Every structure is written in structure tokens, then in C-alpha cells.
């Protein structure tokens, strides 16, 4: 396993675009949190984003994992191109000739996905912990370490999404087309949702029930939007006499669905590779 | 002798087209093999199958008597297929380092092999900045990193300029001199003729011949002659049991006769002299591989 990870890391570390994308990926959350912690002097009133309660434990786990997970697109480009470049450079062929088995090849990519997801998860954990310790109103250990399932959800979400990217990279063989396909697939899922909502199920709950089985929706389901949990929005909502009933909790079946998709994508990539002549 | 590769009834179909049809041959340690055939005859497909990048339709093959799985066996093989394929953004050395990791060997030999192919001074240049000839030489260096049991080269001089072709041939000769088994696929006959001891001829996916280069044609060669008394010469040749198929080459005007038995040029000259014919030109030749090849492929057309 370490050998395969070494091989993959060697391939990535010298690629300029990979380096830049990865650095951007990690820099953006850092700079945003820096900005958020600065005092803005806004029309004479001190506005500090950090004071709006977004960095309170344990809410911060939810908030940060949700926001930062949008940036996964940067790493998605890295993953898709690390697959499809092997086709365009024809290095996949040479790798196999040099004695890498097809299974090892896919595994080396998958291990890299696990490693990148893990790195990102650790990063989010540390960043949130530091921000929280600075700005949270509650810093008791029992509160700090509650709701940590969002960190787990974040990791699974990345692994699932990146596995999808890997599969597309193998399927389409060209990075630009694979990314395009990803976007098209996103739209397809939305269209299916609309059809389900208006034509077949008729209810939002019913449509959601079916949609949770689609890959992108399944990964999105792991961490739901956190904004309606914010204090001032809750207050605003109660003033408007509306009620939010959103289930934020992480369910075992959501995790199971994503893990099943991950397995399908990894297995599918390998099956595609085995079937093809290079 | 040690068998390196045994191919048995290997077949590959692309849809309706049969690219490789029931090919069988064996590769023994220490020989230099050439796979010869026109473009599109199935050479690369055959190599692709034994190298695990093309799926076979039927038949089977065994590396090293089938003691190891294919990808383990391939770690003891050095191979280049068609294009030199490397990561363009890495330097020569970084690329070779990666190959070492894949083959599970130490990277101690990188400099030595770069030296062998004359790329040591360019080891820190990006692969994308290399000329085709340099890429091809880097590919050879990479194939040699593990001191392979067999080196497989597919069209190594394809697309190179004369200087590049010369360099590659020199390298191949150097490697052959170390006793490494080599399998060289090419459509260039003189290339195979110059370096190979054994040859496998493929045409349209069908194997026409497999064996030693000099046993390929049972003939004893031919002689080219010229004399003042040309008419008498032809007369004598026609009536003599040593010769057959007497022709006059239109371009050179030389009289050409196929030998029916092994005759020394000396003896031949003496015989003609005794008949009153003084030769101004006498050359005894073996048919070149090119002629034999054309003959073989025409016979089977």
C-alpha cells in the first residue's frame, strides 16, 4: 500500500498545476478565516463576522465542513486530471508494461484519494478547532468535542465525490470532458429531481427519498446546509412565524449509500480498465 | 536453455478483424529475436498481449515458465512499445525514479543507464523538452533499469533521423553484446538482419516463419557473373547441374544464376576457366533478408 501511495505521490508532486490547485485549496479557507476574524469598521459600527456565532462550538463543525466542502472542486480537478492524464500521456500503458497490475494502478489512485481526503479532513478539523478556541462562546471540552460526526461525514463525502471523479476520469479519458460530464451529471440529477417532484412523487419528501440514492445528492446529503441553524436566522424565522424543519443529523444510511457508491466507482474504474485495450 | 516467453496459439480479434491469428513461438534466453512484418501486420498487438495492455481473445502465453503472475514477471522485463511514454512535466531522472518505484528496484542504476544512452548531461531536463531521438533513448534507459532478462523493443527507430537511427542501433548492439535477450519488432528488414539471430515473420496476423535467420531460406545463394563471352557463359550455365534460373539483370547487365548446391567461388571460377570463359566479375551472394522476406510474403499472398 505504501509503495502504491509513493508511486502516486511521485507522479503528483512534480506537476505544477496539481501543486497550484492544492495550495489554492488549502489557502482559501485559511484566508477566509483570517478575514472573518478581523474587525471591520463598517459605517462606524464594528462588524466582526466571527462574532455572529458561526464559530461557536459545536456549530462550527457543521458550518466549516459544509462551507469548505465546496472547495472540493479544486481537488476534483486534480483527481480527474491525474486519471485522464495517464491516458493522454499514455503513461498508463507504460506503467502496466513496467509491471504495475491494473488493480494496483486503480488502488494507487484510490489510496491517493483517501490520502487527500484525510489531509483535507485533518486540515478542516485543526482549522475549526483553532477558530473555535479563539471565538467560541463555549470552550468546555464536552461541547468542543460534540457533533464531531460532521468531520466523519466530511471525510466520507470527499472520498465518495473523488471516487466519482476518478471513475469519470477513467470513463471519459479527457480531463476537460470528464469535468464537463461531472457538471452535466449535476444538472441531470437536478432535472430528475424536478421531474420526481412535479410529475411522479408530487411531494418534496418523496422526491428527496428517491434522490438520496443518486451519487451527487448522496454526497450532498451527508452535510446539510447549516445556515438555518444560525441564531439570527432562527430569530428571524420565528418572527416571520415560519418553522424550519430540517433534519441536520447524519444518518447511518446516508453514509452507507455513499460508501456503496464509492465501492461501485472504484470497482467500475477497475472493470473499465480491465476490459479496455490500450 | 531457459525459456523466457512461450506463446501458444495466441489470437486477437478486433470485431471482425483478426489482428493476430494463432501465433505460437518461444523465446529462449540469450538470443536476439526479430519480429518482422509490414505495418499493421499484428506485431504490436502481439507484444501488447504479452505485455498485459491488450486483452487476448484466445490462446495463452507464459513468462518464465509461468512461475509468476504476469505483472510480477513484467518487472523482470524491459519493454518499449511504439512511442516513448513518460510524464512530460518530470525530468528524465524523476521519470526514471518513478519507473524504479514501479519495478520495485533501487534507483542506483539510473546514472549508469543514462550514461549508456548518452543522456547523462540532460538528466535534469524536462521530458517535454526532449527530441524524439532523446525520448526514445530515455525509454531504452528506462527499460534497462532493472537489468531485464529480456528487452522488448517495438519499432525503436521509427520516425528518427539517420543519426538517431544510428545511435539507437549502436545502443542495441552494446546491449546485445552484454548477453541480454532482445526481442525487436520492426518493419525495417536491414535493421533485423543486422542484429538478430532469430526471426519471426508475421503478415496480416498470420505467422509465416519462425526460426534462425540463416535457416530461413534453404537455398545456397546465388552468383553474379560477367564475361566477354556472355552468350557462351549463359550456354555453359544452362547445361550445368550447379545452376538454375539463369537470368540477366537488366540494370547491371550481370548474369545471375541460383546455386543448386554449395559451390566455392574458386571452384566455380576454375570450372568456367576450363571451359574457356574468363570472368570479369564474380560475386557469390546469399539472398538478403529483404529478398527472402518478399519471397515468403509473396508465396503466402
Image (cartoon, helix red, strand yellow):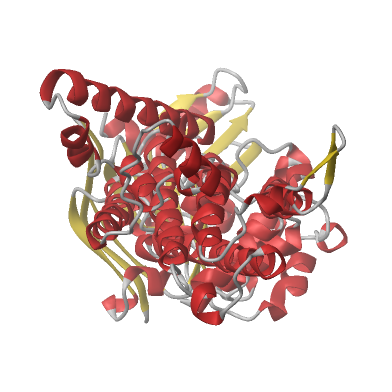
Identify which residue, B43 or A17, lies in the foreground: A17
Residue at screen point 51% across, 22% down: B231
Q: Quadrant of the C terminus of chain A?
A: top left
Vertical placement of residue A167 versus B4, above or below: above
Vertical placement of residue A80 versus B294, above or below: below
Q: Quadrant of the N terminus of chain A?
A: bottom left
Residue A7 is left or right of residue A109, and the answer is right
Vertical placement of residue A205 versus A133, above or below: above
Q: Residue B4: image x %, image y %?
A: 38, 73
Q: Residue B17: image x %, image y %?
A: 23, 31
- Count of numbered circles in the view: 0
Identify which residue, B227 or B123, lies in the foreground: B123
Residue at screen point 46% across, 48% down: A229
Q: Residue A122: image x %, image y %?
A: 57, 69
Identify which residue, B57 or A156, lies in the foreground: A156
Report whether residue B262 is seen. no
Report whether residue A160 is seen. yes
Vertical placement of residue A221 versus B225, above or below: below
Which residue is the extreme one toward the left?
A: A200
Residue A171 is left or right of residue A108, and the answer is left
Q: Residue A141: image x %, image y %?
A: 55, 81
Residue B91 is left or right of residue B15, and the answer is right
Amino acid at each position: 500500500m505504501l509503495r502504491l501511495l509513493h508511486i502516486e505521490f511521485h507522479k503528483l508532486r512534480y506537476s505544477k498545476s496539481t501543486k497550484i490547485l492544492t495550495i489554492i485549496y488549502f489557502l482559501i479557507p485559511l484566508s477566509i478565516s483570517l478575514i472573518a476574524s478581523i474587525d471591520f469598521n463598517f459605517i462606524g459600527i464594528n462588524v466582526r463576522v466571527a462574532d455572529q456565532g458561526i464559530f461557536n462550538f459545536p456549530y462550527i463543525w457543521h458550518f466549516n465542513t459544509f462551507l469548505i466542502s465546496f472547495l472540493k472542486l479544486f481537488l476534483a480537478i486534480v483527481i480527474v486530471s491525474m486519471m485522464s492524464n495517464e491516458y493522454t500521456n499514455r503513461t498508463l500503458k507504460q506503467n502496466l508494461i513496467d509491471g504495475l497490475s491494473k488493480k494496483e494502478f486503480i488502488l494507487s489512485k484510490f489510496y491517493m484519494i483517501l490520502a487527500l481526503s484525510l489531509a483535507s479532513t485533518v486540515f478542516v478539523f485543526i482549522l475549526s478547532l483553532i477558530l473555535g478556541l479563539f471565538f467560541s462562546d463555549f470552550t468546555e471540552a464536552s461541547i468542543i468535542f460534540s457533533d464531531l460526526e460532521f468531520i466523519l461525514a466530511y471525510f466520507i463525502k470527499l472520498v465518495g465525490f473523488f471516487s466519482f471523479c476518478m471513475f469519470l476520469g477513467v470513463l471519459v479519458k479527457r480531463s476537460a470532458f470528464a469535468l464537463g460530464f461531472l457538471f452535466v451529471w449535476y444538472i441531470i440529477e437536478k432535472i430528475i429531481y424536478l421531474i420526481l417532484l412535479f410529475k411522479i412523487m408530487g411531494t418534496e419528501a418523496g422526491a428527496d427519498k428517491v434522490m438520496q440514492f443518486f451519487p451527487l445528492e448522496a454526497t450532498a446529503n451527508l452535510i446539510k446546509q447549516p445556515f438555518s441553524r444560525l441564531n439570527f436566522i432562527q430569530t428571524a424565522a420565528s418572527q416571520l412565524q415560519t418553522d424550519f424543519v430540517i433534519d441536520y443529523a447524519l444518518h447511518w444510511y446516508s453514509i452507507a449509500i455513499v460508501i456503496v457508491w464509492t465501492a461501485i466507482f472504484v470497482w467500475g474504474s477497475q472493470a473499465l480498465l480491465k476490459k479496455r485495450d490500450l | 536453455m531457459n525459456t523466457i516467453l512461450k506463446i501458444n496459439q495466441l489470437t486477437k480479434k478486433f470485431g471482425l478483424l483478426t489482428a493476430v491469428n494463432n501465433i505460437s513461438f518461444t523465446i529462449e534466453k540469450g538470443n536476439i529475436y526479430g519480429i518482422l512484418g509490414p505495418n499493421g501486420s499484428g506485431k504490436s498487438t502481439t507484444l501488447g498481449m504479452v505485455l498485459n495492455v491488450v486483452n487476448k481473445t484466445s490462446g495463452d502465453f507464459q513468462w518464465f515458465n509461468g512461475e509468476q503472475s504476469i505483472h510480477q514477471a513484467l518487472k523482470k522485463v524491459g519493454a518499449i512499445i511504439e512511442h516513448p511514454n513518460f510524464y512530460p512535466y518530470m525530468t528524465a531522472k524523476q521519470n526514471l525514479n518513478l519507473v524504479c518505484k514501479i519495478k520495485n528496484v533501487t534507483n542506483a542504476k539510473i546514472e549508469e543507464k543514462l550514461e549508456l544512452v548518452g543522456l547523462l548531461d540532460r538528466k535534469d531536463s524536462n521530458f517535454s523538452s526532449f527530441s524524439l531521438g532523446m525520448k526514445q533513448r530515455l525509454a531504452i534507459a528506462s527499460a534497462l533499469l532493472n537489468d531485464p532478462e529480456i528487452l522488448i523493443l517495438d519499432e525503436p527507430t521509427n520516425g528518427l533521423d539517420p543519426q538517431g537511427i544510428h545511435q539507437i542501433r549502436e545502443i542495441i548492439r552494446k546491449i546485445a553484446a552484454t548477453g541480454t535477450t532482445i526481442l525487436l519488432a520492426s518493419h525495417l528488414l536491414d535493421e533485423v538482419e543486422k542484429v538478430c539471430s532469430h526471426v519471426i515473420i508475421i503478415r496480416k496476423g498470420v505467422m509465416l516463419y519462425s526460426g534462425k535467420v540463416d535457416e530461413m531460406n534453404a537455398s545456397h545463394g546465388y552468383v553474379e557473373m560477367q564475361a566477354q563471352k556472355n552468350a557462351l557463359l549463359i550456354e555453359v550455365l544452362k547445361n550445368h547441374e550447379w545452376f538454375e534460373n539463369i537470368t540477366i539483370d537488366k540494370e547491371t547487365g550481370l548474369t545471375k544464376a541460383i546455386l543448386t548446391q554449395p559451390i566455392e567461388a574458386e571452384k566455380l571460377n576454375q570450372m568456367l576457366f576450363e571451359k574457356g570463359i574468363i570472368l570479369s566479375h564474380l560475386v557469390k551472394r546469399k539472398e538478403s533478408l529483404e529478398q527472402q522476406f518478399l519471397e515468403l510474403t509473396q508465396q503466402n499472398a
